[in-house]
Amino acid sequence: MADTLGILVSSRNHLDTVVELVTAAHARGKETQVFFTGSAVFLTLEPAFAKLEGKAKLWVCDVSFRTNGLHGREDDVPGVDYKSFATQGRNAEMLAEVDRYVVF
């Protein structure tokens, strides 16, 4: 079995599934990274997003966050510090680091 899982989330449609997948991977001791981009940045402000905190390394596309009018709300995103607002380069690095990669 793979030890690391990368998840790319680019739509607003699958937060519950992402939370379930991350929770299951965490329970099995898997390292998980999740990158939110495009309209998925709106998920960072949903109450269920907080369930990811401490279970995965979370990244948010800074350009998408700003483009979607969320600049100034960075402190409202649980489990994501200012260094975790990143570019698509971070997504590419994640792809190279993980054993499995899932896209939503």
Image: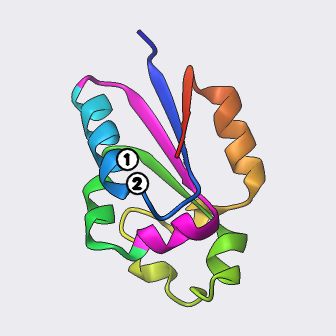
Residue 81 is left or right of residue 71, and the answer is: left
Q: Which residues are magenta?
A: 28-44
- Rendering coords of residue 51 (x, y %): 25, 57
Left or right placement of residue 100 versus residue 87 in this view = left
**Residue reaching furthest left?**
27
Q: Residue at x 46, y 14 (%)?
A: 2
Residue 77 found in image quarter: bottom left
- Between the C-alphas of marks 2 and 1, the distance is 6 Å
The verdict on residue 31 being magenta is yes
Q: Which mark is residue 14?
A: 2
Identified by mark 1, the residue type is Val
Query: Label 1 crowding class (10 Å Cα cut-off): few <14, some 14-19, many 20+?
Result: many
Labels in figure, total:
2
Q: Position of residue 31 (x, y in %)?
A: 42, 30
Quadrant containing the N terminus is top left
Q: Residue furthest front?
A: 13
Q: Is residue 69 above or below residue 55?
A: below
Residue lying at 44% horizontally and 60% vertically, measured from the top left:
13
**Circle 1 sits on which residue?**
18
Q: Nearer the viewer, residue 38 or 2?
A: 38
Magenta highlight on residue 33:
yes
Residue at the farthest top position: 1
